[in-house]
Amino acid sequence: MPYILKTRVDPVNYKEATQKIIEWAEKGENRYVCAATVHMVMEAFDSEEFCQVVNNADLVTADGMPLVWMLRLLGHKHQKRCCGPELILWVNEAAAEKGIPVGFYGSTPEVLQDLKKNLLQKFPKLKIVYMYSPPFRPLLPEEEKQVIKEINQSGARILFVGLGCPKQERWMARHRGKIRAVMLGVGAAFDFHAGYKPIAPKWMQNLGLEWLFRLCCEPRRLWRRYLYHNPRFLYYAFQQIIFKKQFI
């Protein structure tokens, strides 16, 4: 299995990832899926604890184009992107066809309502059985137990988690074995598909410039993430590819 710096990234495409998720969901299995970006790889590089969270996931897709290019250089020549905002559409379409109930955890009540409306317009047969916008603070133990109970009682077999990296990955890891669903960490996908944030043009995505588009849209929130992590990623990626340095 290929590793980019310290992070395992599985060389799968949208179809393969969706098939795995649907198979797990149909069996009622508890799994979690990460969509890896440069940000996530560097968070894992800097934190051994978070590195284990990501590497212990059941599936880690290549969300960012720099990771796709790295996988190609590591021998997976036909690797393509498999990003959270697009994967959420693939999985919901398949879930609608199969009658698999889905749920959404994260963001704000307004975003969730508009997300639900937009997804049902795309996939009228989609069964959305759970939606919850958690408070912007850690849940109390009693609240945490209630959330787990409500998710399981809802019957959701796929739970999309939109808390942002690295919070959502830690949340999924913490709930492994507690929630009877496949959990997918999808970052800002809720905001994109609810119409609250613009999606980068395809040409910018294909050139690996989605980070620049998002930085221009939200400079105060994202400047440190991109201007701190991206140059460091390039430095260490160069060492891995050119000098065959291993970081694990």
Image (cartoon, rainbow, N blue to C red):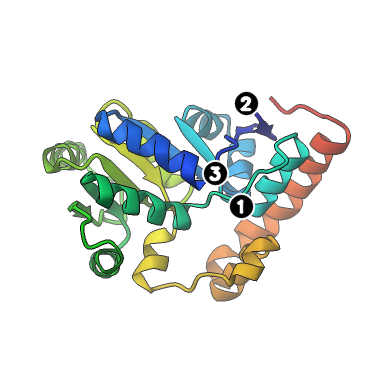
Is 125 above or below relative to 122? above
- Disc 1 and disc 3 in contact, CB within 8 angstroms: no
Instruction: Write down the residue under mark 2.
Output: 1
- Indicate the position of residue 233 as horizontal and vertical percent values: 72, 47
- Disc 2 and disc 3 in contact, CB within 8 angstroms: no
- Indicate the position of residue 131 as horizontal and vertical percent values: 21, 54
The reply to whether residue 146 is in sight is yes
Instruction: Write down the residue under mark 3.
Output: 13
- Please, what is the three-letter code of the amino acid marked with disc 1? Gly
Q: Residue at x 68, y 24 (%)?
A: 248
Is 107 above or below relative to 154? below
Q: Residue at x 48, y 39 (%)?
A: 16
Q: How many angstroms separate mark 2 from mark 3 (CA)?
A: 15 Å
How packed mark 3 is, by other alpha carbons closer than 10 Å (few <14, some 14-19, many 20 or more), is: some
Instruction: Write down the residue under mark 1.
Output: 64
The reply to whether residue 175 is in sight is no
Q: Residue at x 54, y 49 (%)?
A: 82
- Please, what is the three-letter code of the amino acid marked with disc 3? Asn
Q: Earlier in the sequence, mark 2 or mark 1?
A: 2
